[in-house]
Image: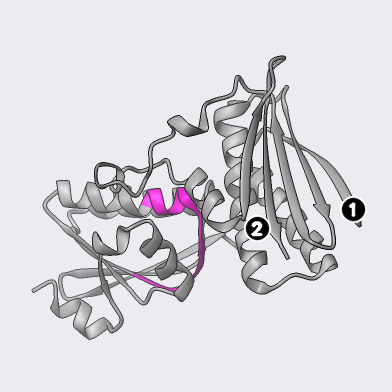
Amino acid sequence: MAELNIAERQAGDVTVLDMSGKITIGEGSVALRTAIRRLLEEGKKRILLNLAGVGYIDSSGIGELVSSYTAINKDGGQLKLLNLTQKLQDLLTITKLLTVFDVYEGEAEALNSFK
Amino acid sequence: MTVETTDFSLPSSIEAVATAAAVVAEFVSRNGVSEEAAFGMDMAVREAVTNAVLHGNKQDENKAVDLTLKSSPDAFEIIVHDQGPGFNPSEVPDPTEDENILKTSGRGIFFMRTFMDEVDWLIRPEGGTTVRMLKRR
């Protein structure tokens, strides 16, 4: 089983990536990077990461989230985060990234925020 | 009094990070530790071994990363040694400063310091860096 599983679905013009597993150095970080690059190449610039199933992330994974955020912004798009686990929320808090990312607890609210 | 000491030699590859984490998980489960402390040690050893593999040994397959785990009645100690040229930890920028928040790297040492009670480095004159991290029980 892959370290990080990513399932893609479309909700209007927002692409939702349902993620489960670990975003850590190596396979997990690369999987996230590859998915975001592919979406940008396809012109899909409104991206919601559903992180409900991501129980673990390391500094490399956090770096990849930042890299995704800046790449999408640079391309004129938006990246938002949905359903952070407590551990992920704690890590984004201590790194002060919770103030950078747009974070939601409900999918409907998250999707509406793109409008 | 040290209750248990275990030594491992790991290759300088990214895969060594998960191996080290698995070794620590097994060690702490054998020695009894809170879930919170186990999470912190897992995080810290991953970051320390990542640094040793990438920045210390630069993924040179001829160089090893040595991992030592010690359990005492008071604390757990994790020691990671690489064969790199060393660095000055005080020169590593604070990733929580405004100008660094959106950097894509540079949070590993911050996590090690956050999740462990003591972290110090020994730069050996003959080469190699040793990081020693302590988690009190």
Q: Is B98 placed above or below A95 here?
A: above
Residue A39, position in %: x, y? 26, 55
Label 2 crowd bin: few (<14), some (14–19), many (20+), radius 10 Å: many
Residue B70 circle label:
none
Label 1 crowd bin: few (<14), some (14–19), many (20+), radius 10 Å: few
Image quadrant for the C terminus of chain B? bottom right
Tell me where residue B8 sits by quadrant: top right
Tell me where residue B10 sits by quadrant: top right
Along the viewing direction, whichever of B4 and A78 lies nearer the viewer = B4
Nearest to viewer (mark 2 / mark 1)? 1
Identify residue for label 2. Answer: B41
Mark 2 residue element: helix
Write the start and end of the magenta stretch as one range. Answer: A50-64
The residue type indicated by label 1 comes to Thr
Whether the magenta-drawn stretch holds residue A6 is answered as no
Mark 1 residue element: loop
The chain ID associated with circle 1 is B
Along the viewing direction, whichever of B73 and A112 lies nearer the viewer = B73
Tell me where residue A48 sits by quadrant: bottom left
Image quadrant for the N terminus of chain B? bottom right
- Give the mark, 2 or 1, whose residue is nearer the N terminus: 1
The residue type indicated by label 2 comes to Met
Which residue is painted at 51% across and 44% down in the image? B109
Which residue is painted at 17% across and 51% down in the image? A73
Identify residue for label 1. Answer: B2
**Residue A41 seen in the figure:** no
Which residue is painted at 53% across and 46% down in the image? A26
Residue B45, position in %: x, y? 65, 49
